[in-house]
Image (tube, rainbow, N blue to C red):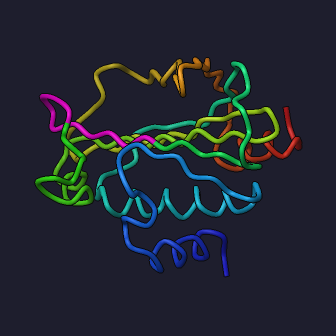
């Protein structure tokens, strides 16, 4: 089974709320491989739910003081959406988050993954047909987690594979 088929199957085994219990959440993993599997399957689930074309998104190496580690791997996730004139409420109070993402003009998914004193961000920006980003190819330059600011550096050619390779000490 190919890697994409494997993660597509994993994404189909769980509902949207399993991967995204809210628009902002933290999840702990025992191993870096568990986090890798989750990010791959959740990314597929996000793409299907938003029903939009991938517009941009890169992986970045984050610099900043390492957070206190309660678990071997910590993941922070942010989901955002816009209707073209402003932010869409993803709280689910009036309608499920998956429906709100589908109706939005743009949808953004960002994972921050922390392991062994290293951190990466993995982003996915999606747009409805006929829309374009007016800010060019700008990526998010800084992230703040628990009052700590991390600066993003976007190495050329980085995606999920290379970001996790960096976390596993495989690449710089």
Q: Nearer the viewer, residue 92 or 122?
A: 92
Q: Where is residue 101 in the image (x, y as percent from the top left)?
A: 25, 51
Q: Which residue appears at 15% of the width and 38% of the height?
A: 83
Above-or-below relation of 80 to 147: below
**Residue 112: within the magenta?**
no
Q: Which residue appears at 73% of the width and 49% of the height?
A: 71
Q: How many marks?
A: 0
Q: Position of residue 37 (x, y in %)?
A: 65, 63
Q: Which residue appears at 50% of the width and 39% of the height?
A: 123
Q: Where is residue 40 in the image (x, y as percent from the top left)?
A: 58, 59
Q: Quadrant where the N terminus lies?
A: bottom right
Q: Quadrant where the C terminus lies?
A: top right
Name the side, left or right, on which 138 lies relative to 27.
left
Above-or-below relation of 59 to 18: above
Residue span colored magenta: 78-87
Q: Nearer the viewer, residue 91 or 36?
A: 91
Above-or-below relation of 51 to 136: below
Name the side, left or right, on which 111 lies relative to 36.
left
Q: Which residue appears at 77% of the width and 33% of the height?
A: 118
Above-or-below relation of 68 to 109: above
Name the side, left or right, on which 117 lies relative to 51.
right
Q: Residue furthest right?
A: 170
Q: Where is residue 29 in the image (x, y as percent from the top left)?
A: 68, 57
């Amino acid at each position: 089974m190919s890697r994409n088929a494997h993660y597509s199957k994993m994404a189909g085994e769980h509902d949207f709320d399993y991967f995204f219990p809210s628009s902002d959440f933290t999840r702990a993993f025992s191993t870096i491989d568990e986090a890798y599997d989750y990010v791959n399957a959740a990314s597929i689930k996000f793409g299907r739910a938003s029903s939009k074309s991938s517009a941009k998104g890169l992986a970045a190496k984050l610099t900043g003081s390492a957070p206190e580690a309660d678990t071997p791997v910590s993941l922070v996730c942010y989901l955002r959406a816009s209707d073209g004139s402003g932010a869409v409420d993803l709280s689910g109070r009036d309608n499920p988050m998956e429906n709100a993402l589908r109706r939005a003009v743009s949808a953004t998914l960002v994972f921050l993954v922390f392991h062994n004193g290293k951190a990466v961000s993995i982003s996915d920006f999606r747009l409805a047909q006929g829309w374009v980003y007016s800010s060019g190819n700008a990526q998010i330059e800084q992230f703040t987690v628990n009052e700590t600011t991390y600066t993003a550096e976007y190495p050329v050619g980085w995606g999920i594979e290379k970001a996790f390779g960096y976390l596993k000490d495989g690449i710089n």
